[in-house]
Image (cartoon, rainbow, N blue to C red):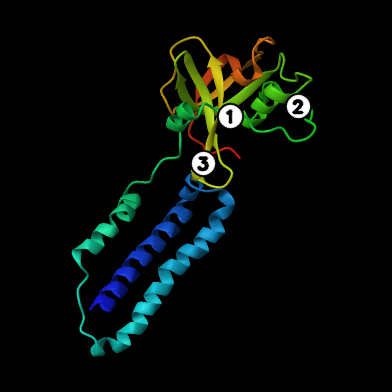
């Protein structure tokens, strides 16, 4: 009886997990948990988890007359509750909750910094903006109008435009944050915005470890959340 119940339970649980993995891949929701390149490995794993238990269950039916069949215990369905919730409610990407509690970080600069393009305003990722602001000895951002996009996170003294980045998956994610000096009330948390403004150069006498990079906004526009919410 224990063997029969275990086989039924294992088949049910593994099959549903495989179906969930396939669902988030086909919907593109996997980018909320892992990097986009992991689509194909996840697709293969989800297919394996979905198909193989079903094939094994079908093969075992040939011997079912030799075993007394038992129903699935009620506790088994409780094991599927988290997966069922995930099917019904797609979890959102990491946002302001993480950004407001991580303090923001700056990617490490690698090698010589390339000259910035001659565009006005200059579109930059938050990581590029922070790298040039923190490490560029030529101060290439000085007097340049830049265009940044991200979600809104709140500060005690205002608000910031933020983006979550990750090395591998959501478990190692951290926030890239640029403070925004703008007139008017601060936007609601997790609102996606486009900010056009100029770099606010920090006081040279300030400790570099405590510098918070910022822009003086001349225009803030609300935008839709991009298909890829994380920045790589």
Q: Measure the C-alpha gap from mark 3 to mark 2.
A: 26 Å
Between marks 2 and 1 in the image, the one whose residue lies nearer the viewer: 1
The structure residue drawn at horizontal position 48% and vertical position 35%, both measured from the top left corner, is 225
The structure residue drawn at horizontal position 29% and vertical position 72%, both measured from the top left corner, is 6
The tag earlier along the polypeptide, 3 or 2, is 2
Lateral position of residue 136 relative to residue 62, left or right: right
Where residue 188 appears, as percent x and y from the top left, is: 41, 22
Query: Which quadrant: the N terminus?
Result: bottom left
SS under mark 2: loop
Q: Quadrant of residue 112?
A: top right
Where residue 74 appears, as percent x and y from the top left, is: 19, 63
Where residue 99 appears, as percent x and y from the top left, is: 48, 29
The structure residue drawn at horizontal position 41% and vertical position 40%, both measured from the top left corner, is 92
In the image, which disc is placed on residue 43? none
Between marks 3 and 2 in the image, the one whose residue lies nearer the viewer: 2
Query: Which quadrant: the C terminus?
Result: top right
Question: Can residue 88 be spotted in the picture?
Answer: yes
Lateral position of residue 16 relative to residue 154, left or right: left
SS under mark 3: loop
Do the numbered discs 3 and 2 sit on residues whose CB atoms are within 8 Å?
no
The tag earlier along the polypeptide, 2 or 1, is 1
Do the numbered discs 1 and 3 sit on residues whose CB atoms are within 8 Å?
no
Query: According to the image, label 1 marks what residue?
Result: 105
Query: According to the image, label 3 marks what residue?
Result: 227
Question: Can residue 192 be spotted in the picture?
Answer: no
Q: Is residue 77 above or below residue 135?
A: below
In the image, which disc is placed on residue 116? 2
Label 1 Cα crowd, 10 Å radius (few <14 / some 14-19 / many 20+): some
């Amino acid at each position: 009886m224990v063997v029969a119940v275990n086989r039924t339970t294992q088949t049910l649980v593994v099959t549903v997990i495989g179906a969930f993995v396939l669902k988030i891949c086909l919907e593109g929701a996997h980018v909320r948990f892992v990097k986009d390149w992991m689509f194909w490995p996840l697709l293969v794993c989800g297919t394996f988890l979905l198909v193989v238990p079903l094939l094994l269950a079908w093969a075992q039916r040939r011997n079912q007359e030799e075993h007394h069949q038992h129903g699935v215990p009620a506790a088994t369905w409780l094991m599927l509750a988290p997966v069922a919730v995930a099917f019904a409610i797609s979890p959102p990407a990491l946002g302001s909750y993480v950004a407001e509690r991580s303090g923001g970080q700056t990617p490490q600069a690698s090698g010589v910094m390339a000259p910035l393009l001659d565009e006005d305003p200059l579109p930059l990722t938050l990581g590029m903006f922070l790298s040039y602001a923190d490490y560029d000895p030529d101060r290439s951002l000085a007097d340049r109008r830049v265009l940044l996009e991200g979600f809104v996170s709140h500060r005690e003294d205002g608000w910031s435009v933020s983006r979550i980045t990750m090395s591998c998956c959501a478990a190692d994610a951290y926030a890239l944050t640029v403070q925004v000096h703008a007139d008017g009330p601060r936007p609601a948390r997790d609102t996606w915005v486009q900010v056009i403004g100029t770099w606010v150069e920090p006081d040279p006498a300030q400790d570099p470890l405590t510098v918070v990079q910022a822009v003086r906004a001349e225009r803030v526009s609300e935008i839709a959340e991009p298909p890829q919410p994380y920045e790589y």
